Image (cartoon, grey):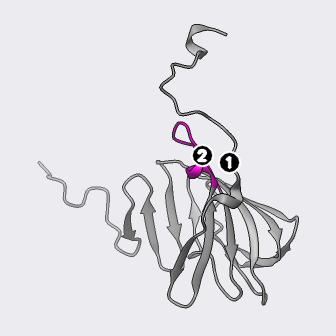
Amino acid sequence: MTDDARPTGREPENRPIAAAEIPWEEFRHGSRYALRYRHLSAATPGQPYRVGVAVEELPPGKQSCPAHYHTAEEEHVYVLTGALTVRLGRRRIVMSEGDYVRFPAGSAEEHCLINHTDRACTYLVIGERNVDDVRVYPESNKVMIARTREIFDRGTTRDYWDGETVD
């Protein structure tokens, strides 16, 4: 072990955690969007994380979030129990226990999860935490800059030189 790799005693102890002991957090917006989740990465001791891992549960008839795509982040979903419909652009594909899908960074194909069944669906979601990401929401014509969490209307576009002083 090199000197650079030795623990300094200042870092929190890294250790396994029991996912079942992490309390569920709930998200709900109107009657369309709802889920509950256990954010595993946020619950682990140690340095800030670069990859987020969460167990999510999507109730019957609910959608996970507005359909969107990422310019710099990649996401992965693995279904643990139940079934859901993944929206990939105009396509709708049913996923069930053991199915996996990846949402690559830079793909302009929006995605979201919809529970079309009468029972909850539990899945693992894994994603990067890229502060340089821009999220695009085609249905509502918005963009969100991850670093600042600012959201802009794509319908209000400007020319590169608008507002600049001309000599």
| Residue at image point 73% right, 82% down | 115
All told, the count of numbered labels is: 2
Q: Quadrant of residue 124?
A: bottom right
Between 89 and 103, the one lying in front of the other is: 103
Q: Quadrant of the N terminus?
A: top right
Between 122 and 65, the one lying in front of the other is: 122
Residue with the most extreme right position: 98
Q: Is residue 41 magenta?
A: yes
Q: Secondary structure at mark 1?
A: loop
Circle 1 residues within 10 Å: few <14, some 14–19, many ≥20: few
| Residue at image point 80% right, 67% down | 79
Q: Position of residue 63 (x, y in %)?
A: 63, 81
Residue 61 to residue 163: above or below: below
Q: Name the residue tied to disc 2.
A: 44
> Which amino acid lies under the numbered mark 2 shown in the image of this protein?
Thr
Is residue 98 in view from this perspective?
Answer: yes
Q: Position of residue 83 (x, y in %)?
A: 82, 77
Q: Position of residue 58 (x, y in %)?
A: 68, 77
Q: Name the residue tied to disc 1.
A: 17
Q: Position of residue 2 (x, y in %)?
A: 62, 8
Between 141 and 144, the one lying in front of the other is: 144
Residue 58 appears left or right of 70: right
N-terminal label among 2 and 1: 1
Q: Is residue 107 magenta?
A: no
Is residue 93 in view from this perspective?
Answer: no
Residue 12 to residue 130: above or below: above
Estimate the spatial distance between the alpha carbons at disc 2 and disc 1, rounded to whole Å. 7 Å
| Residue at image point 59% right, 80% down | 34
